[in-house]
Amino acid sequence: MDNKNLKKLEALKNPKVMEYVNEAIALCKPDKVTVITDSPEDAAYVRELAIKNGEEAKLNTQGHTIHFDGPKDQGRDKEHTRYLVSKDINWGIDVNYTLKKEGVPEIRAIVDGSMKGKEMLISFFALGPLNSQFSLKALQVTDSAYVTHAEAILYRSGYNEFKKLNGSADFLYFLHSAGRLENGVSMDVDKRRIYIDLEENRVYTINNQYAGNSVGLKKLAFRLAIQKANNEGWLAEHMFLMGVHGKRGRITYFTGAFPSACGKTSTAMIPGQTIIGDDIAYLRKVDGKVRAVNVEQGIFGIIQDVNPRDDALIYKALTTPREVIFSNVLINSGKPYWLGMGMEPPEEGINFAGKWFKGKTDANGKPVPYAHKNARYTIRISELDNADKKADDPKGVMVQAIVYGGRDSDTSVPIAESLTWAHGVFMGSTVESETTAATIGKEGVREHSPMANLDFLSVPLKKYIKNHLAFGKNLEVRPKIYTTNYFLKSDGKYLNDIPDKKVWILWAEGRVHKEYKALKTPIGMIPMYEDLKKMFKKERNKDYSREDYIAQFSLRVGKYLEKMERMVAVFNGIDMPAAFSKELQEQISRLKETKKKYGDIVSPFEFEKK
Ligand code: SPV
Ligand code: MN
C-alpha cells in the first residue's frame, strides 16, 4: 500500500479496520492496495478499473455497462453458503453450517494467495441512510472492481460514517475474491465458498461473481443483520419498503416480504406508488410506532419481463443514459437484450455462456435462451421517477402495513388480512413458495419460507418468530398484516393479470384507514365483492364479475388443510413459542369447522351471509 492510501486508512483512526486490512493483505497477497473514500474521484476510479479489468464493458448508451457472471454462477449458491459457528446449534430448520475449527482453516487455505497479481480494493459503506440510528456500517475488501462498483450503486458510501465510529469495532466485515479468472470469470467454481462467521460478524466469499454470492453487503450482510436484530429486539427483513398512495393525497408506508422472484420489486414499483426499497429493510419501534429504512439505495433487479407495458418506469431508466450495470443479458453491437423485453432479439450475440446464435441448443438438444432468466440490472433508486421523497430520511418512515407473499398456484387467496398481530406472524411464518431461477437448483418445487426469509435465517426459528411476536407488543400504531398471492391458478391458468396487484395493495391501504369492510373467514379478513368491483373499474378499467371474485376468493379449505398438515410436519419437530403453536392449532380448528359446514371449497359469499 502506498503512502497516499495508507493515509486514507489511518485517517479513520480505527484499530479494527487496520487489523482486518493487515490480515487481508497478509492472507490474499495482492500486488496493489487501493483505499476508496466517498469522493467522486474514487468512485470514478472504481468504474474505470472495472472496465480496464474486463469485468465490465461499456455499452452504447452513456453510463451503461455489461458484466457477465460465469456460466455456473447465475444464482445464489445455497449449498456452499454456510455459517461458521463454534458449537452445534439447533436451528429448527435446515441451515447450512460448519464448525469453525474446520471451516476457518478450510476457507483461509482457499483464500490464501487469491489476490496475487491483482489489486485489492478497500471500501466503506453504510447499510441504511447516513446519520441514522438504523444504519450498520460495513467494510468491504475485494479484488473485484465490479463488486465495488455494484456496491457503490446499491449502498450509501460510508467512509465518513466510519470516521464517526470513533474507533469502534461495531461494523461488519466482508472479504471477497473472485479467485483465478479466465475470460473475466472465476475458474475454480468447485472451490466456491461463502462462509459467514456469525460470532465475529465477518464474511469470506471466494471464486464467484454473481452479486448474490459476491456482493457482501447484500444477502451476506443481511444474514449478519438478522442475527443482530434478533439479539437487540428489532427486525431485519427480506422486505421492500414503499409509499402506497391512497385517497386525498394520503401516503401510507408498507413493507413486504416475498421470496426471490415472486413479485417483490414489481409490488414496490406498482404504478402510481413510490418506492423506497425493493429488497431489505430494517424496522425498529420508535415512540410506539414502527419505523423502517431501506438498507440499500439501489435495485439489483430481475430484468426479465421489464418492458414498456409491464414495467414502464424501469424500462425507461434502463434505456436512457445513466449509471446502470446489466448482467447476464445478450449483447449485440453494444446493445442489451433480455427475455420479455417486448422486442425481437437479434439473431446472434454474446451472453453469459459465450457466443449465442438463433437455434443454439444444449447437450440435450434443448434450445438455449438468448439471456438468463436471472439476468439483472443494477441501478440507483434515485434514478427512478417514482422514488419516494423520504427514501433517505435518517428517521425512516412509519410502517402501517406488512405484506407477506409467496408463489402459490393452488391454495392462498390473492389477499387476506390477519385477524390479529399473532395471526399475522403465523401467516408470515407459514409462507410457502415454489422455487425460482434466483437460486441454483430445480425450479417450481414448493418450499416453506418463514417471512420469505428461509434462505437467510441466521438465528434459530424459535428465536426469530418470538422476536416477531414481541415486536407487535406495546405499539400505539400497530401495522396491519396481509398475505398476498399473485400466482393462484385454476385449470393451469393464472386467475389474475400481473397489474391486478395494484387493487390488492390499494385495498389494504384503504383498510388501514378503515375505508372498507371485510369478510371474516377462517384464514383472515378478505375483501368484499362490491369494493373490488369499484376498484377494478377505477384502477384497472376492468369489469370485475362475481365469477371472477368467486374464482379468486373461494376458500380452498381442503387445500388450506393440506397446507396445515405440511406445517404441522414442519413445526412438530421444532420447539416453537407457545403463542405460535396456539395460532397453528386455532387455524386448523377454524378450517376444520368450515369444512364440516361448507365442504372443500367455499364461496366467499357464504361468509357474507353470516
Ligand atoms: C434475491 O435472490 O433475493 C435477490 C438477489 O434479491 S440476490 O442478490 O441474489 O440475493
Ligand atoms: Mn432478495
Image: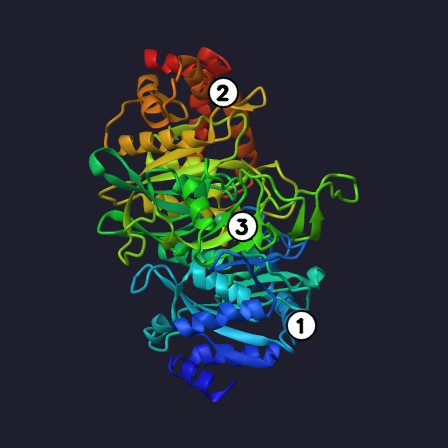
Disc 2/disc 3 C-alpha distance (Å):
36 Å
Hey, what amino acid is under mark 2?
A: Arg
x and y percent of residue 175 in the render?
54, 69
Residue wearing tag 2: 556
The answer to whether residue 198 is seen in the rendering is no
Question: Where on the picture, by quarter, is residue 7?
Answer: bottom left
Residue 563 is at least partly visible in this image: yes
- Front-most of 77 and 556? 77
Pick the quarter of the image with the C terminus.
top left
**Above or below, comparing residue 607 to residue 468 in the picture:** above
Amino acid type assigned to the residue bearing label 3 in the image = Arg
| 422, 279: nearer the viewer | 279
Residue 523 in which image quadrant: top left
Q: Residues within 10 Å of mark 2 (few under 14, many from 20)?
A: many
Instruction: Please tell me how crowded label 3 is: few (under 14), some (14-19), or many (20+) other residues with Cα within 10 Å.
Output: many
Q: Decide: is 356 above or below 594.
A: below
> Please, what secondary structure does the residue beneath circle 3 have?
strand
Q: Quadrant of residue 500?
A: top left
94 relative position to 583: left or right: right
Under mark 1, the amino acid is Ala
The residues bearing labels 1 and 2 have C-alpha atoms spaced at a distance of: 54 Å
Image disc number at residue 212: none
Residue 272 in the image, given as x and y percentages of width and height: 33, 38
Q: Are marks 1 and 3 in contact (CB under 8 Å)?
A: no
Q: Which badge, 2 or 3, comes first in the chain's sequence?
A: 3
Task: Rate crowding at label 1 as few (under 14), some (14 to 19) or many (20 or more) other CA atoms within 10 Å.
Answer: few
Mark 1 vs ligand 1: CB under 8 Å?
no
The residue labelled by disc 1 is 109
Q: Is mark 3 within 8 Å of ligand 1?
A: yes
CA distance for labels 1 and 3: 32 Å
Q: Which residue is mark 3?
A: 376
